[in-house]
Image (spheres, rainbow, N blue to C red):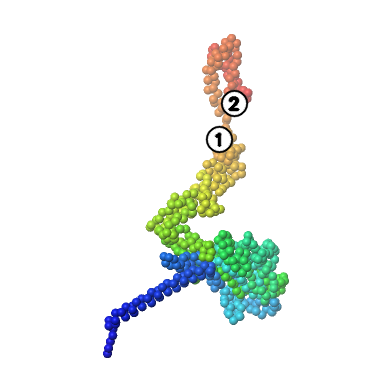
Amino acid sequence: MLSRDSSSMPTSLSSEIYAGTSLVSWLALVMLARATFFLLVLLHMLVQVQGQYELCKSLLATDEGSVWEQHACQPKAKSMKEFMRIRVEPPGITCGNPPERFCTLENPYLCSDECDASNPDLAHPPQLMQDRERGGLVTYWQTQTWRRYPEPLLANITLSWNKSLELTDDIEITFEYGRPTAMALEKSLDYGHTWQPYQFYADDCLEVFGMAPQRARDLTASNATRVICTELYSRWVGAKGDKVVRFEARTRFTIFAGHRLRDMDSLRARFESNKGLRDFFTLTDLRLRLLKPALGGTYVQRDNLLKYFYAISNIEVTARCKCNLHASQCVLVDGNLQCVCEHNTTGQDCQRCRKGFKAKIWKAGSYLPTPIGTPNTCAQAGTSSGSNCECHGHSNRCSYIDYLNIVTCVSCKHNTRGQNCQHCRMGYYRNSSVELDDESVCVECGCNQMGSLHDRCNGTGFCQCKEGTMGIKCDECLPGYYWKQGCQPNVCDEELLMCQNGGTCHQNQRCICPHEFKGVLCQHSRCESGKKCNHGDHNGASVPALSLALLVLCPLLTLLLGSAVLRPETVPVFLPPSHTSTHTCDGALAITLLCTLKEPRTSWT
């Protein structure tokens, strides 16, 4: 057999084949590069045209090559019915335990229907409010009948997602056998810890809730977040008529986005400038408070209470996971919805920066500028995107801490402190009326040093006071205390700590007692028990000593008077008021240095 290998081929032919192969490869690479370039351009244009913030990043062709361009992004809106947890209160409000019959408002005397929790075909448990009805069979949750009238028939239905959601369409509740005469819709932003009203529903808003009736379509840009009461969904139209009760979120959106929501950019721009508007459509939980069942257009008929109850077949909530514009996907993790975070963020709502990417303070993404927004990506310390100081204008110096892998502000001014000068120094509190970059963001506590335990205060400026002290700055006293270098307990007063035995209270600080009494409240006598006080003996004891002194002083007085030798006179000498004796010096006897003691006077003159 003949064989031929490449070494036996002519050299010129081999070169031509090699050159042809190289040319084809080169042309293929050029075509692939052009196709990739046009694909990237098309993808980038597609992102801009869509403007729906569905992509967090896209490849952008530049002179240096392809780079990732970051965008603000959010998950798609979808029905949240299958993710919600339902809780019904009070316990036992669901019908069927024990079994009971009920009627309908259209056939009030044909009470052949039965609710029995032990029979799957006759039970009406809460989960039937979120099931997918197939084959035209309507399933619904139902309460007990109003057999305890006139006691109110009340029921609460709480819907929880354990996740922050943003409404994108109307909330719809479908009732069977008539919509309630009165009900309230509430929402929570903190997983059910606190609640706030969302909307009220009644056939007579003024009578039931004390509010004038209003429609969502009558709201304006200045009051788009107003909580209203509507009569649109509570008046009787027949059990087979309109069954749906709505919270009209879409109608409120049209105030800013126009008819059919054609100008969504305008709505998103308003979300950026008005945080309260965006928060109005944000929730973690919803609660229906059913206050009065459908009455069939008449008054309550006591002879047939089996036709009054609540029944709900479906609750529809269309929303998207709130991911702060840092994620385009939201998935179920361990039974809870979780954002798949981008932009170096983390958390259930992408509400903080990942470890190692905290060179700048975390910020939510922004819808502006349209159509791709601003991602506000968390930056890694030491990178070009993380080299700038984020100190809210309170410092222009930063320091990189290697072992912590963070950048922190240095020498924060305006009484601020913290990694980004975002906290107030000890002895100062945050001024909530100004932005974080304002020079007056931190206000001095000003706690009274004598009335407060320390110079620190809480977030609203209230100091921690010592016992008996009150006031924002601890500079006032509680009843029963007086101020003396701080609040001291009253020694006396005119109510409970009264001075005794005729004493008077001086400025709540001490009792001024009569001469005969002593003690804090003048409660003790100065005399020994069982003995009478002899004030005369006490006072008279000093008279002999005074008389002896006067015997020495009389000659001196006589010499000073000068005329005592020629004309005897009596010179009166008076003692203090506590003594009742009066002494006189006789001028004639002054030569012999004798003084006579006259009888004491009975009064001081």
Residue 266, horizontal then vertical, whole percent: 58, 63
Give the residue displayed 61% in from the left and 71% down from the top.
Answer: 172
Instruction: Name the side, left or right, on which 573 lies relative to 422.
Output: right
Residue 577 is marked as: 2
| Residue 313, visible in the rendered structure | yes
Give the residue displayed 60% in from the left and 15% down from the top.
Answer: 570
Residue 187, horizontal then vertical, whole percent: 58, 65
Q: CA distance from mark 2 to mark 1?
A: 22 Å
Mark 1: amino acid: Arg
> Looking at this rendering, what residue extends furthest in the bottom direction?
1
Instruction: Determine whether 60 is above or below 600 in the image.
Output: below
Quarter of the image where the N terminus is located: bottom left
Instruction: Determine whether 255 is above or below 417 in the image.
Output: below
> Looking at this rendering, what residue extends furthest in the top direction?
566
Q: Nearer the viewer, residue 241 or 509?
A: 241
Q: Residues within 10 Å of mark 1 (few under 14, many from 20)?
A: few
Quarter of the image where the C terminus is located: top right
Residue 526 is marked as: 1
Secondary structure of the residue carrying numbered label 1: loop
Mark 2: amino acid: Pro
Give the residue displayed 48% in from the left and 52% down from the top.
Answer: 393
Residue 228 is marked as: none
Q: Earlier in the sequence, mark 2 or mark 1?
A: 1
Give the residue displayed 64% in from the left and 72% down from the top.
Answer: 244
Secondary structure of the residue carrying numbered label 2: loop
Instruction: Name the side, left or right, on which 336 lies relative to 26.
Output: right
Residue 124, horizontal then vertical, whole percent: 60, 76
